[in-house]
Image (cartoon, rainbow, N blue to C red):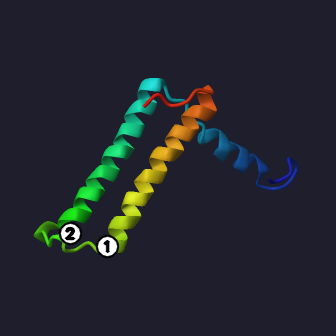
Amino acid sequence: MIKPHAPGFKHQVEQQQQMKFEFTKKEFGELIAAAKEAGIRWKKARTLWKVGHHAYTRHNEQELRENIERFKQTEKMLIDRYKTVTGDEWPG
């Protein structure tokens, strides 16, 4: 971290303050559900790609795997964030 008297400190603090998000339990639920749904859609896309469905030929297996993993990590990050903010386990 930059020392309080160093150049750029004020900018870094402003950035950190802008990144604070406060969500309600309902909003956390919507975000977690959206991440889960996106992961499921990418898994379906991978299945359709494997069987050669014409709409998915522009994708490749690595891209599909990366997207599945990205949304899995996003879901986990949101659940972890919920626990950090509230101190409670995510009920879903």
Q: Amino acid at mark 2?
A: Trp
Number of callouts: 2
Please give left or right for residue 48 compared with residue 83 in the image: left
* Residue in front for this viewpoint, 91 or 54: 91
Query: Which residue is tagged 1?
Result: 61
Q: Position of residue 83 (x, y in %)?
A: 59, 33
Element type where label 1 sits in the image:
helix
User: Which residue occupies 47% across, 49% down?
Assistant: 74
Query: Which residue is tagged 2?
Result: 49
User: Which residue occupies 38% across, 45% down?
Assistant: 35
* Residue in front for this viewpoint, 32 or 20: 32
> Quick check: marks 1 and 2 in contact, CB under 8 Å?
yes
User: Which residue occupies 21% across, 71% down?
Assistant: 50
Q: Position of residue 37 (x, y in %)?
A: 31, 45
Element type where label 2 sits in the image:
helix
**Sooner in the amino-acid sequence: mark 1 or mark 2:** 2
Please give left or right for residue 38 compared with residue 45 in the image: right
Label 2: how many Cα within 10 Å (few below 14, some 14–19, many 20+): some
Q: Position of residue 43 (x, y in %)?
A: 29, 58
Q: CA distance from mark 1 to mark 2?
A: 8 Å
Picture quadrant of residue 84? top right
